[in-house]
Image (cartoon, helix red, strand yellow):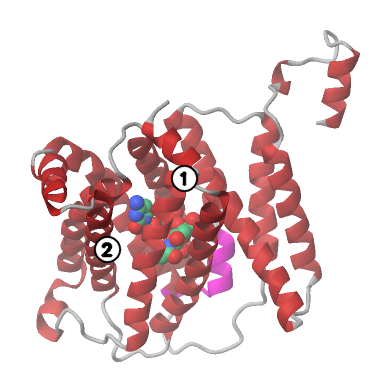
Amino acid sequence: MNGATMANENVSVIFKVYCLTVMTLVAATYTVALRYTRTISTEELYFSTTAVCIAEVIKLVLSLGMLTKETASLIKLKATLQEHIFCSPKELLKLSVPSVVYAVQNNMAFIALSNLDVAVYQVTYQLKIPCTALCTVLMLNRSLNRLQWFSVFMLCGGVTLVQWKPAEATKVQIEQNPVIGFIAIAVAVLCSGFAGVYFEKVLKSSETSLWVRNIQMYLSGIVITLIGVYMTDGERVMEKGFFFGYTPWVFFVVFLASVGGLYTSVVVKYTDNIMKGFSAAAAIVLSMVASVILFGLQITMTFASGAFLVCISIYLYGLPKQDTSRLTWKDTNLEDKQKLISV
Ligand code: NCC
């Protein structure tokens, strides 16, 4: 049994549900807040590349704090940093791969939300679910049977319906280009699937702590996002300053990006990227149901059918695995025929 499996067993279900719920709530708030900061004003608009960079710095500091807590002594902390950071250029290089990809993805989110309505963004971004499943199969050598693939696409459709809202009625004050927005989402979808599964692979193939892996990734993340600042907004940042246009809302977006990223890493450690998609969908449905009970929110037909699809897909995905693709009608006995019918 490797360290990852052991860690998985030692953590309570309540803790996993807590992390998933926080991650999902933060992600929903992040998307809305980010869109708000990109559309309220045209003159004092901050440089989004700097926000992505600052989030990496905050995540690095917080991960260092968590590692200090985990090692419980300064001497041990120093030894850990020495071994895994200062004397491990190969490992740093390995983690710079998801760093680059996440840096692209995080910048794409700003581009997409500067050009598209939140609802359109959230719905289209659900394509990351099948993309993540494909990356999991290709990169982690895991297999999904036909029913699981079916449930992955059903989940994608279900979340799309659950989040379906009429387009934003308010007029925004900026020029928007939906084509650029959709291209940015497509790139973000591919990046999310690849980087998520790559990080999971590295994390679960050794006993190295999550916080060490995060520190390794955020170190290169800072360098890469700084290059992004220089290449995209270099001159204007020099002229106007790194924090030009920062309002309390922008700081709030950076805070959410940092907290959301760290919770994502914990969720991937204790579950996996596909489960992350399923659980996030369940959390969205549950939070809507809670709003109905607590605040009397009206349920729409699209939400009800989406929630139904999400629940069925979770059930189907969790069914015990049996490879029905190898069963054919002619050579099966009665029991297997019944299985084929039920599938
Ligand atoms: O798209 P998504 O995640 O897969 O993006 C993962 C985010 O987590 C950060 N990360 C990942 C691993 C790690 N060890 N440390 C990290 O900081 C990456 O930098 C990247 O930002 C999702 O599954 O829908 C989720 O969506 C994001 C975000 O809403 C979208 O990318 C939209 O832009 C959520 N991030 C936040 O809420 C800040 C994430 O929690 C869940």
Gap in angstroms between the C-alphas marked 1 and 2:
19 Å
Circle 2 crowding by C-alpha within 10 Å: few under 14, some 14–19, many from 20: some
Residue at 18% across, 54% down:
219
> In the image, ligand 1 is in what quadrant?
bottom left
* Label 1 element class: helix
- Of residue 69 and residue 93, the one placed in the foreground of this image is 69
Residue extent of the magenta highlight: 114-125
Residue at horizontal 18 percent and vertical 52 percent from the top = 73
In the rendered image, the vertical position of residue 294 relative to residue 17, given as above or below? below
- Of the image marks 1 and 2, the number of the one nearer the N terminus: 2
What amino acid type should be assigned to the residue bearing mark 2? Leu
Q: Which residue is mark 1?
A: 270
| Picture coordinates of residue 36, whole percent (x, y) | 45, 83
- Quarter of the rendering occupied by the C terminus: top right
The answer to whether residue 123 is magenta is yes
- Residue 328 is drawn in which quadrant? top right
Main secondary structure type of the part rendered in magenta:
helix
Element at badge 2? helix
| Residue marked by disc 2 | 62
Front in this rendered view, residue 293 or 311: 293
Image location (x, y in percent) of residue 42: 35, 89
> Along the line of sight, which residue is nearer the eye, 71 or 31?
71
In the picture, measured across the screen, residue 211 lies left or right of residue 273, that is left
